[in-house]
Structure formats: structure tokens, C-alpha cells
Image: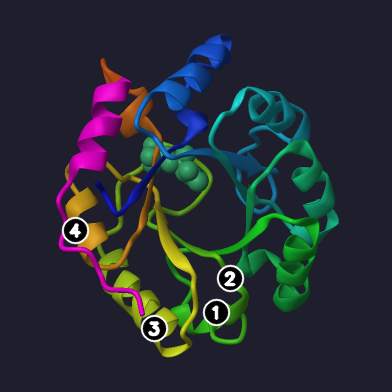
Amino acid sequence: MSSHLVAPSLLAADFRHLDRAIDLVNTSEADWFHLDVMDGRFVPNISFGQFIIEQIAQGAEKYVDVHLMIEDPGRYIESFARAGANGITVHAEACTHLHRVVQQIKESGAKAGVALNPHTPVSHLENVIEDLDTVLIMTVNPGFGGQKFIYQSIPKLRQTRDLITVHNSRAVIEVDGGIGLQNAQKVLEAGARVLVAGSAVFGADDPAAVISQLKAIDANPVAYV
Ligand SMILES: O=C(CO)[C@@H](O)[C@H](O)COP(=O)(O)O
């Protein structure tokens, strides 16, 4: 059985047939739904909000992972939890009071995650890592699907893994951006545990087969202590 998780990012799905994308995730070997919320301020793009997430969550038979790429996300934690998010990830760069927002997520009943943009050092997590369930390492600059994986992310994954180990945190590392069959093994070996994949899955002729191939990757798993 595979020790890592696959989370298709619905941003790359065909929204004219959202029901098909939901069925695909439900019936494939995928583990999580990954839903990207963009506000046109923190990132240049605008995607969708609580209303669409609620619709997806009603059809989802798996964990719903919500990635908030929005300014001042503390304003909306409660409403995304109510919409059906099982996990909520906020960006460290978008929070003046990151510690407070992490506590808000925990109080909402959702699992708590913090994301880091490619330029943000892992040290930004030092004082919250013990409270986190996930750390999302952006492997592209956020805002758009279909971008090229940034290779400098590999050492950053190792640094994140080390920080988690030093603090004896339960957090697992999620990687997001340009992830596909060409680099999945490398990121898993560097410490990633959750593979978020948008275009690699929904841009494929057979998305379920790609999900199975991602699940089947036999990486030398990192021992979490
Ligand atoms: O958060 C984001 C983009 O900002 C991602 O979740 C993308 O949706 C991943 O898409 P691909 O890079 O896999 O196409």
C-alpha cells in the first residue's frame, strides 16, 4: 500500500462538467479533493469561493482540502469550514497574525495547514509548526495551474522535513504546482507526503490512470518520527 496521498486539484477540471470531476476523484485511487480559492489580490487570479466548495463537498466522498490564496484569510475560516472543508490551508505571507489564524482553523474543527510561496523561507514556520497538520510547499508561484515546477523546491522540502522532525510535529508535507509523473518520485523522496496535481491529472486522456500511476510510485519513504 502506498504511503503517500494524491490530491487532484479541481482548478484544472472542466467546470462545465464538475460532476464528472467529482466522480473521478470519488471513484479513482485519489485520496483528497484539492480546492484552490483565489481572490485576485493575494494572487492575480480569481477562482471560486464557499458556494462552489459547498457544492463540491456535498458530492465528495473523500477529504476536502481547501487552499486559501487570499489576503487576510482569518475573515473566512469559519465560513469555509461550514462549507465542508476538512482541511484549511492559509498562506504565511497573507497573515499578519499567523498563529491566531492557525488557532482559528483548529477551533473551526478543520485540520490546519500553512502554505509557503517559493521565496518564503521554511524558518517562517518555526513558531507554529507544532500546531500544524499540513505544510504546503508551493513549487510554483501561486495563482495559476499548468506552470513549470521550480527545482529549488527540492532542498526546501528537505528543510521542511527537518523542521518537522526537530519539533516533533505531526505535520505532513504537501507539494503543489507542476507536479506530475516526471517529478513525483523526487519530491516524495525529499519529504513530500501529499501530491497535489492539477493539469497532470485533468489534462490527461485517462485521469484515473495518472492518479493510479502517481499512487504507485515507489519512493523511498521518509521516516517521520
Ligand atoms: O495552487 C495552485 C496554483 O496556484 C495549484 O493547486 C494548481 O492548481 C496546481 O496545478 P498544476 O500546476 O498541477 O497544473
Specify which label sits upstream in the sequence, 3 or 4: 3
**In the image, ligand 1 is in what quadrant?**
top left
Q: Residue at x 33, y 70 (%)?
A: 157
Whether residues under marks 3 and 1 lie with C-beta atoms below 8 angstroms apart, the answer is no
Task: Measure the alpha-carbon separation of dots 2 and 4.
Answer: 24 Å
| Mark found first going from the N terminus, 3 or 1 | 1
Find disc 4 in the rendering and name its residue. 186
Name the residue that disc number 3 marks: 165
Q: Residues within 10 Å of mark 2 (few under 14, many from 20)?
A: many
Q: Is residue 218 above or below residue 115?
A: above
What amino acid type should be assigned to the residue bearing mark 3? Thr
Classify residue 151 by image quadrant.
bottom left
**The residue tagged with tag 2: helix, strand or loop?**
loop
The amino acid sitting under disc 2 is: Leu
CA–CA distance between discs 3 and 1? 13 Å
Picture residue at 76% right of the left edge, 47% below the top: 81
Which residue is identified by label 2? 132
